[in-house]
Protein backbone atom coordinates (compact mmCIF):
# COMPACT_ATOMS: atom_id res chain seq x y z
CA UNK A 1 0.00 0.00 0.00
CA UNK A 2 1.37 3.39 -1.00
CA UNK A 3 2.35 5.88 1.68
CA UNK A 4 -0.17 8.69 2.24
CA UNK A 5 1.71 12.00 2.35
CA UNK A 6 0.72 15.60 3.03
CA UNK A 7 3.61 18.04 2.59
CA UNK A 8 3.43 21.77 3.26
CA UNK A 9 5.66 23.93 1.07
CA UNK A 10 6.20 27.21 2.91
CA UNK A 11 8.20 28.66 -0.01
CA UNK A 12 9.87 32.01 0.88
CA UNK A 13 7.49 32.94 3.68
CA UNK A 14 7.55 33.57 7.44
CA UNK A 15 10.14 35.06 9.78
CA UNK A 16 11.82 32.62 12.16
CA UNK A 17 9.47 33.62 14.97
CA UNK A 18 6.43 33.12 12.74
CA UNK A 19 7.75 29.78 11.49
CA UNK A 20 8.25 28.48 15.02
CA UNK A 21 4.79 29.65 16.05
CA UNK A 22 3.26 27.81 13.08
CA UNK A 23 5.29 24.70 13.89
CA UNK A 24 4.22 24.72 17.53
CA UNK A 25 0.55 25.13 16.55
CA UNK A 26 0.74 22.22 14.12
CA UNK A 27 2.52 20.03 16.64
CA UNK A 28 -0.32 20.64 19.07
CA UNK A 29 -3.15 20.20 16.57
CA UNK A 30 -2.12 17.03 14.79
CA UNK A 31 -3.59 14.13 16.75
CA UNK A 32 -1.78 10.87 17.35
CA UNK A 33 -4.08 8.84 15.10
CA UNK A 34 -3.39 11.22 12.21
CA UNK A 35 0.37 10.92 12.59
CA UNK A 36 0.21 7.17 12.34
CA UNK A 37 -1.71 7.01 9.07
CA UNK A 38 -0.33 10.01 7.14
CA UNK A 39 3.26 11.11 6.63
CA UNK A 40 3.33 14.84 7.39
CA UNK A 41 6.20 16.94 6.04
CA UNK A 42 6.99 20.63 6.54
CA UNK A 43 9.13 22.05 3.73
CA UNK A 44 10.74 25.05 5.40
CA UNK A 45 13.20 27.68 4.14
CA UNK A 46 16.86 26.73 4.65
CA UNK A 47 17.51 28.95 7.71
CA UNK A 48 14.60 27.37 9.60
CA UNK A 49 15.26 23.67 8.96
CA UNK A 50 17.16 22.94 12.14
CA UNK A 51 15.06 25.15 14.47
CA UNK A 52 11.82 23.66 13.13
CA UNK A 53 13.17 20.12 13.38
CA UNK A 54 14.35 20.71 16.94
CA UNK A 55 11.02 22.15 17.99
CA UNK A 56 9.14 19.19 16.54
CA UNK A 57 11.38 16.64 18.23
CA UNK A 58 11.59 12.96 17.37
CA UNK A 59 8.16 11.95 18.65
CA UNK A 60 5.95 14.51 16.90
CA UNK A 61 5.31 12.34 13.84
CA UNK A 62 6.04 15.40 11.66
CA UNK A 63 9.10 15.48 9.40
CA UNK A 64 11.00 18.40 7.89
CA UNK A 65 12.18 18.83 4.29
CA UNK A 66 14.27 21.27 2.29
CA UNK A 67 12.81 23.08 -0.71
CA UNK A 68 15.81 22.54 -3.00
CA UNK A 69 19.42 21.39 -3.14
CA UNK A 70 22.38 21.81 -5.47
CA UNK A 71 23.40 19.25 -8.06
CA UNK A 72 27.01 19.75 -6.93
CA UNK A 73 28.61 17.81 -4.12
CA UNK A 74 30.72 20.72 -2.82
CA UNK A 75 32.87 23.60 -4.04
CA UNK A 76 32.84 27.24 -5.06
CA UNK A 77 29.07 27.65 -5.45
CA UNK A 78 28.27 30.63 -3.25
CA UNK A 79 24.74 30.58 -1.90
CA UNK A 80 24.07 26.95 -2.77
CA UNK A 81 23.23 24.11 -0.36
CA UNK A 82 24.35 20.55 -1.13
CA UNK A 83 22.59 17.27 -0.45
CA UNK A 84 25.50 16.34 1.82
CA UNK A 85 24.78 19.42 3.93
CA UNK A 86 21.11 18.50 4.16
CA UNK A 87 22.03 14.95 5.14
CA UNK A 88 24.35 16.26 7.86
CA UNK A 89 21.43 18.07 9.53
CA UNK A 90 19.12 15.09 9.25
CA UNK A 91 16.82 16.13 6.41
CA UNK A 92 14.91 13.09 5.07
CA UNK A 93 13.23 14.86 2.11
CA UNK A 94 13.93 17.57 -0.46
CA UNK A 95 11.65 19.15 -3.09
CA UNK A 96 13.23 19.11 -6.56
CA UNK A 97 11.95 20.54 -9.84
CA UNK A 98 9.21 22.76 -8.43
CA UNK A 99 7.70 24.84 -11.22
CA UNK A 100 9.01 28.01 -9.61
CA UNK A 101 12.55 26.62 -9.76
CA UNK A 102 12.03 25.69 -13.39
CA UNK A 103 10.49 29.05 -14.29
CA UNK A 104 12.53 31.54 -12.27
CA UNK A 105 15.87 29.75 -12.01
CA UNK A 106 16.05 27.97 -15.35
CA UNK A 107 16.27 24.44 -13.99
CA UNK A 108 15.85 21.90 -16.78
CA UNK A 109 15.64 18.15 -16.96
CA UNK A 110 19.40 17.66 -17.22
CA UNK A 111 20.05 19.64 -14.04
CA UNK A 112 17.17 18.01 -12.20
CA UNK A 113 18.42 14.52 -13.03
CA UNK A 114 21.73 15.45 -11.39
CA UNK A 115 19.90 16.84 -8.35
CA UNK A 116 17.89 13.63 -8.06
CA UNK A 117 21.13 11.65 -8.10
CA UNK A 118 22.71 13.93 -5.49
CA UNK A 119 19.76 13.52 -3.12
CA UNK A 120 19.58 9.75 -3.51
CA UNK A 121 23.35 9.40 -3.04
CA UNK A 122 22.94 10.85 0.44
CA UNK A 123 19.83 8.88 1.33
CA UNK A 124 17.43 11.82 0.94
CA UNK A 125 14.03 11.18 -0.64
CA UNK A 126 13.36 13.58 -3.54
CA UNK A 127 9.87 14.97 -4.00
CA UNK A 128 10.10 15.41 -7.77
CA UNK A 129 7.70 17.96 -9.24
CA UNK A 130 6.25 18.01 -12.73
CA UNK A 131 3.38 19.87 -14.38
CA UNK A 132 2.25 21.98 -17.28
CA UNK A 133 1.58 25.72 -17.74
CA UNK A 134 -1.83 26.93 -18.89
CA UNK A 135 -0.95 27.42 -22.57
CA UNK A 136 0.26 23.83 -22.84
CA UNK A 137 -2.93 22.54 -21.20
CA UNK A 138 -5.07 24.67 -23.54
CA UNK A 139 -3.20 23.26 -26.56
CA UNK A 140 -3.71 19.71 -25.28
CA UNK A 141 0.02 19.16 -24.85
CA UNK A 142 -0.05 18.54 -21.10
CA UNK A 143 0.32 14.77 -21.18
CA UNK A 144 3.30 14.88 -23.55
CA UNK A 145 5.05 17.59 -21.54
CA UNK A 146 4.61 15.88 -18.18
CA UNK A 147 5.80 12.57 -19.61
CA UNK A 148 8.88 14.35 -20.95
CA UNK A 149 9.57 15.97 -17.57
CA UNK A 150 9.32 12.58 -15.85
CA UNK A 151 11.60 10.98 -18.45
CA UNK A 152 14.23 13.71 -18.19
CA UNK A 153 14.28 13.78 -14.41
CA UNK A 154 13.78 10.13 -13.47
CA UNK A 155 14.13 7.64 -16.32
CA UNK A 156 17.90 7.31 -15.86
CA UNK A 157 17.25 5.61 -12.50
CA UNK A 158 17.07 1.87 -11.94
CA UNK A 159 14.00 0.33 -10.28
CA UNK A 160 15.50 0.30 -6.79
CA UNK A 161 16.35 4.01 -7.00
CA UNK A 162 13.01 5.03 -8.48
CA UNK A 163 11.24 3.31 -5.59
CA UNK A 164 12.86 5.88 -3.26
CA UNK A 165 11.28 8.84 -5.10
CA UNK A 166 8.01 10.69 -4.45
CA UNK A 167 6.40 12.48 -7.41
CA UNK A 168 4.25 15.61 -7.17
CA UNK A 169 2.05 16.60 -10.11
CA UNK A 170 1.47 20.34 -9.99
CA UNK A 171 -0.38 22.01 -12.87
CA UNK A 172 1.37 25.39 -13.05
CA UNK A 173 -1.91 27.15 -13.88
CA UNK A 174 -3.29 26.08 -10.48
CA UNK A 175 -0.36 27.13 -8.27
CA UNK A 176 -1.14 30.16 -6.16
CA UNK A 177 -3.94 31.18 -8.51
CA UNK A 178 -6.88 29.89 -6.52
CA UNK A 179 -7.72 27.65 -9.47
CA UNK A 180 -7.61 23.94 -8.78
CA UNK A 181 -7.62 21.04 -11.18
CA UNK A 182 -10.87 19.16 -10.89
CA UNK A 183 -10.64 15.81 -9.17
CA UNK A 184 -11.07 14.17 -12.58
CA UNK A 185 -8.27 16.26 -14.13
CA UNK A 186 -6.01 15.38 -11.21
CA UNK A 187 -6.84 11.68 -11.40
CA UNK A 188 -6.35 11.62 -15.18
CA UNK A 189 -2.86 13.11 -14.96
CA UNK A 190 -1.81 10.98 -12.00
CA UNK A 191 -2.93 7.94 -13.98
CA UNK A 192 -0.92 9.13 -17.01
CA UNK A 193 2.19 9.47 -14.86
CA UNK A 194 1.75 6.07 -13.24
CA UNK A 195 1.16 4.35 -16.58
CA UNK A 196 4.25 6.07 -17.99
CA UNK A 197 6.31 4.80 -15.05
CA UNK A 198 4.88 1.32 -15.63
CA UNK A 199 5.91 1.41 -19.30
CA UNK A 200 9.56 1.51 -18.24
CA UNK A 201 9.70 0.06 -14.74
CA UNK A 202 6.76 -2.36 -14.67
CA UNK A 203 3.38 -2.08 -13.01
CA UNK A 204 4.59 -3.34 -9.65
CA UNK A 205 7.16 -0.57 -9.26
CA UNK A 206 4.78 2.08 -10.63
CA UNK A 207 2.07 1.05 -8.20
CA UNK A 208 4.40 1.65 -5.27
CA UNK A 209 5.35 5.26 -6.11
CA UNK A 210 3.40 7.92 -4.18
CA UNK A 211 2.14 10.68 -6.50
CA UNK A 212 0.98 13.85 -4.77
CA UNK A 213 -1.22 16.61 -6.17
CA UNK A 214 -0.09 20.22 -5.83
CA UNK A 215 -2.04 23.27 -6.94
CA UNK A 216 -4.23 25.37 -4.64
CA UNK A 217 -5.09 22.46 -2.34
CA UNK A 218 -7.24 23.70 0.54
CA UNK A 219 -9.50 22.37 3.27
CA UNK A 220 -12.55 22.58 1.00
CA UNK A 221 -11.23 20.54 -1.93
CA UNK A 222 -8.68 18.22 -0.27
CA UNK A 223 -10.99 15.31 0.51
CA UNK A 224 -12.34 15.08 -3.04
CA UNK A 225 -8.83 15.25 -4.52
CA UNK A 226 -7.41 12.71 -2.08
CA UNK A 227 -10.24 10.29 -2.80
CA UNK A 228 -8.94 9.78 -6.35
CA UNK A 229 -7.38 6.32 -6.67
CA UNK A 230 -4.02 7.56 -8.01
CA UNK A 231 -3.73 10.64 -5.76
CA UNK A 232 -1.68 9.73 -2.71
CA UNK A 233 -1.70 13.08 -0.94
CA UNK A 234 -0.82 16.69 -1.50
CA UNK A 235 2.02 19.16 -1.86
CA UNK A 236 0.27 22.12 -0.27
CA UNK A 237 1.35 25.73 -0.76
CA UNK A 238 -0.49 28.71 0.73
CA UNK A 239 -2.85 26.68 2.89
CA UNK A 240 0.12 25.11 4.70
CA UNK A 241 0.91 28.53 6.19
CA UNK A 242 -2.33 28.38 8.22
CA UNK A 243 -2.14 25.81 11.00
CA UNK A 244 -5.84 25.06 11.28
CA UNK A 245 -6.45 24.77 7.56
CA UNK A 246 -3.37 22.60 7.06
CA UNK A 247 -4.51 20.34 9.87
CA UNK A 248 -7.92 19.98 8.22
CA UNK A 249 -6.18 19.01 4.96
CA UNK A 250 -4.16 16.37 6.80
CA UNK A 251 -7.33 14.99 8.38
CA UNK A 252 -8.90 14.79 4.91
CA UNK A 253 -6.13 12.39 3.93
CA UNK A 254 -6.93 10.14 6.88
CA UNK A 255 -10.59 9.86 5.90
CA UNK A 256 -10.02 8.48 2.39
Image: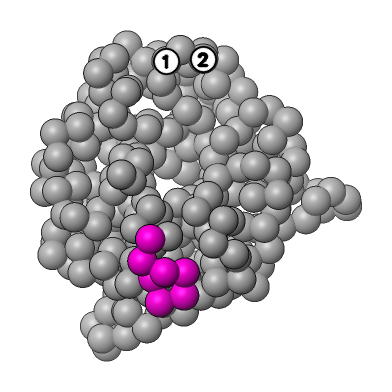
Q: Residue at x 58, y 19 (%)?
A: 51
The quadrant of the picture occupied by the N terminus is top left
* Disc 1 crowd, CA 10 A, few/some/many (<14, 14-19, 20+): some
Residue 201 on the magenta segment = yes
Main SS of the magenta part reads: helix
Label 2, residues with CA under 10 Å away: few <14, some 14-19, many ≥20: few
Query: Mark 1: which secondary structure?
Result: loop
Q: Which residues are magenta?
A: 197-204
Q: How was the colour assigned to the protein in this rendering?
A: one colour
Tell me the quarter of the picture where residue 247 sits. Answer: top left
Above or below, 222 relative to 247 = below
Mark 2, residue position? 58
Based on the picture, tell me whether residue 103 belongs to the magenta stretch.
no
Whole-angstrom CA distance, mark 2 to mark 1, is 6 Å
Residue 115 vs residue 151: left or right?
right
- Point out residue 215 in the picture as x, y percentages from the top left corner: 29, 55
**Is the C terminus in the top left, top right, bottom left or bottom right quadrant?**
top left
Residue 9 in view (yes/no): yes
Q: Image point 61% across, 42% down: which residue?
A: 124
The residue nearer to you, when weighing 54 against 16, is: 54
Q: Which residue is mark 1?
A: 60
Amino acid sequence: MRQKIVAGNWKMNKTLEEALTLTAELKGMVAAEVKGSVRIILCAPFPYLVPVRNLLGQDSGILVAAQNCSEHEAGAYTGEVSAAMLKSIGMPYVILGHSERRQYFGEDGKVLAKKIDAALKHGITPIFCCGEPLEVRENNGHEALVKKQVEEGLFHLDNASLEKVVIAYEPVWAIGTGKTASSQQAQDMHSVIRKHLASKYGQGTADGIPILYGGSVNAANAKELFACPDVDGGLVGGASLKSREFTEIIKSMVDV
